[in-house]
Image: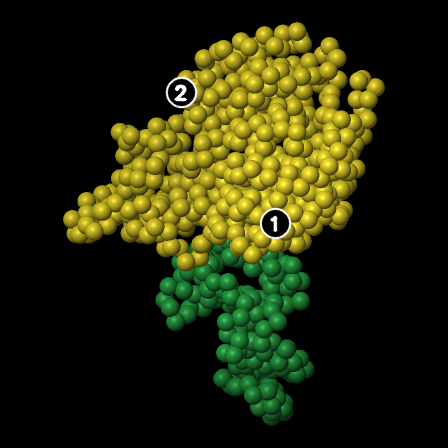
Amino acid sequence: MKHIISTLVQNKPGVLAHVAGMFAARAFNIDSLAVGRTDDPMLSRMTIVVIGDDKVVEQVRKQLAKIIDVVKIQDFSGKEVIARDLMLMNVCTPPEKRAEVLALVEMFKAKVVDIGQKFVMVEFSASEDKIESFIDACRPYGIKNMVRTGTVAMARLSQATGGEE
Amino acid sequence: MKKLSSSDSSTQNPSILPIKSGAEIIVATLIEQGVETMFGYPGGVALPLFDKLYDAPINFIIPRHEQGGCHMADGFARASGKTGVILTTSGPGACNLVTGLATAMMDSVPMVALTAQVRTDLIGNDAFQEADTTGITRPVTKHNMIIKDIKDLQRSIREAFYIASTGRPGPVLIDIPVDIEVAKYPLQPLEEISLPGYKPQEKGHHRQIKMAAEMINKSERPVLYAGGGVITDNASEELREFAKKANLPVTMTLLGLGCFDQREPHSLDMLGMHGTAYANFAVQECDLMIAVGARFDDRVTGKLKTFAPNAKFIHIDIDPSSISKNINVNIPVVGSAKYTLGELTKEVEFKERKAWFDKIADWKKRYPLRYDAKSTNIKPQYVIEQICEATKSEAIIVTGVGQHQMWTAQFYKHIKPRHFITSGGLGTMGYGLPAAIGAQIAMPGATVIDIDGDSSFNMTMNELCTAVQYELPIKVCIINNGHMGMVRQWQQLFYGKRYSKSSLRNPEFAAVAQAFGAVGITVDKKSEVKSAIAKMLAEKRPCLVDFKVEREENVWPMVATGKSLHEMDGLDIFDSMA
Ligand SMILES: Cc1ncc(C[n+]2csc(CCOP(=O)(O)OP(=O)(O)O)c2C)c(N)n1
């Protein structure tokens, strides 16, 4: 099962290595890891998607808490969250298929950000399963390449304080 | 936030703070942190710092190898409770620390390691003697950092000492590039340590403690399972009072030995793979296990699924990640052993539990630790019993790793905390001699004895020269069976006696000792054991005794890998000899 864990870490050199190293050393399974700045220049946020049962995720939380530069941990398991991935994708669009692809883009509320002779680049920010279905839908046309950020997530405001430690 | 005992210097005007070099700041901060003794080995990029140590009021011990120095700092810390300090140069010096750091990490030993590093602008260029020290040591330290700005230097050293010695202690490494050693910056007054991500929880939750007490008061067949955390936290006295008031039998892990006087009738001695039968039976039949500062290591539990099958679990530990890691716990209490045991003692009631103690007494009578005491050969267990008797259990005992370590755990009666020093978690051969040197330096008046294996001793015996140089009266007793005994035992039991690569040609250890300038004695007759021990104990110089013991003795009882604790082998082996 996938669990989203959101951590605030001190914005110091080596923090990412500490976190990533801990995951490797303890044989935890990371699905994705997204790191970015926050409104506080001293802190960064890491959103980590972990695969494992509740017991594994409990250990992940505790082992993260042990890292000195990890300031705060939120486990979003069982919480109502908004979770998004950002994806950029080049889809093959031979002239006769272009309209179909653009219709798909429209339907998924994705965005065309670049148009080439044979490709369009699509930007899509959505939940993971929506992104997966979009990828499936594009596959028949041919995907030249794609990049994804990994999940970022926030608890809904009504629940924003849940699960912090 | 932790308030440091601040001098009034905090009110000083920063503009009149004395300007110092990084090296001077390091030395001043070490002294401020109470460091009187440290261990270390010089090299190129550490020289600015070594220059400032030339006339610093710090007792500086130079080992023969940085690994030895690191184990010395470790032994120093375990014997004294103070933070051990080790300093090395970059690259090879830093790399030589890895085993020592991992040993200290696994056994929660407070240590600060300072490593010099190549110039900041050379980092990443494969410069001469450059190694990615923080990268290499990250998994074997509690925390590590590299200083890239002189502004951070002094604060980081203070933080390192704080992190190393609080919560669940461990080694902290600071990597210091040589340009930082020579850069100038004002010496900073003491200030509050602010680590928003690090707040050890000393005080156990009161509601949890109350619930734990109720469970203990109801229990008919409890067992108190004490680990190294009790000793680390100096909570032996609290443990004794708690066990006495609640009337609990006490079993200890290898690292917990010494936290409860083994002469007490309530002591079940050590549990686990080579634990006593009465401890293991009691664990398997108990209805409640109270774990304090212990972590349900696989050498303790045997097969997890059938470990203490009828028990509920209370787990007291300062490290939340130790709780419910291996065993699902009914009542977790995150807190220090000292605080929590103190509070728990207030809440528990005395309960007689006659049937339980009768059963334990019966196990103790039927399955004492035994060996063939009548043998005319020198039995390793006999040597250890004689050492125990001659020192009245008062010595600080250090070991290597292997059979001799287990026999020392079993046959030396441990009565005091910080008097049994051994590498439990990592099981580091070669730990014994340097750790004994560190312990002797910490406790100059104590009798310190390294009970070592011949192969373990081979790994770090060059440190005998260090003991001679610093005129340390340490004793080394080699339990010389001519094998890597523990490996040979496993090969005998599980690999059809195919003794593959498990014996070494040893030097004449007594002659080696003499060449180093120590006293060397060889004992190959049982009748000479006592007198040799007496001579060794009277010796003021470092003294080694090479006991040529029975070559193929085994450690019993033994719970083979994958077996449950009550499925011990070896319980009947001595029946015919009795
Ligand atoms: C550094 C290291 N290498 C290898 C081992 C594996 N090992 C465990 S016990 C042992 C044999 C120890 O032999 P010795 O020191 O003579 O002690 P004995 O078992 O004979 O008492 C070995 C090789 C280890 N624990 N540590």
Q: Is mark 2 within 8 Å of ligand 1?
A: no
Q: Is residue B181 above or below residue B533?
A: below
Residue placed at 61% from the left, 61% from the top? A57
Q: Amino acid at mark 2?
A: Tyr
SS at mark 1? Answer: helix
x, y percentage for residue B506?
Answer: 61, 18
Find out whether the residues at labels 1 and 2 contact each other: C-beta distance under 8 Å: no
The residue nearer to you, when weighing B522 against B292, is: B292
Direction from residue A80 to residue B302 in the image, left or right: right
User: Label 2 marks which chain's residue?
Assistant: B
Task: Give the foreground label among 1 and 2.
Answer: 1
Q: Which mark is residue B470?
A: 2
Please give the letter of the chain rendered in green: A
User: Label 1 marks which chain's residue?
Assistant: B
Q: Is residue B295 above or below residue A100?
A: above
Please give the letter of the chain rendered in yellow: B
Q: From this viewpoint, is residue B182 visible?
A: no
Question: Which quadrant of the rendered structure holds the N terminus of chain B?
Answer: bottom left
x, y percentage for residue B425?
Answer: 59, 39
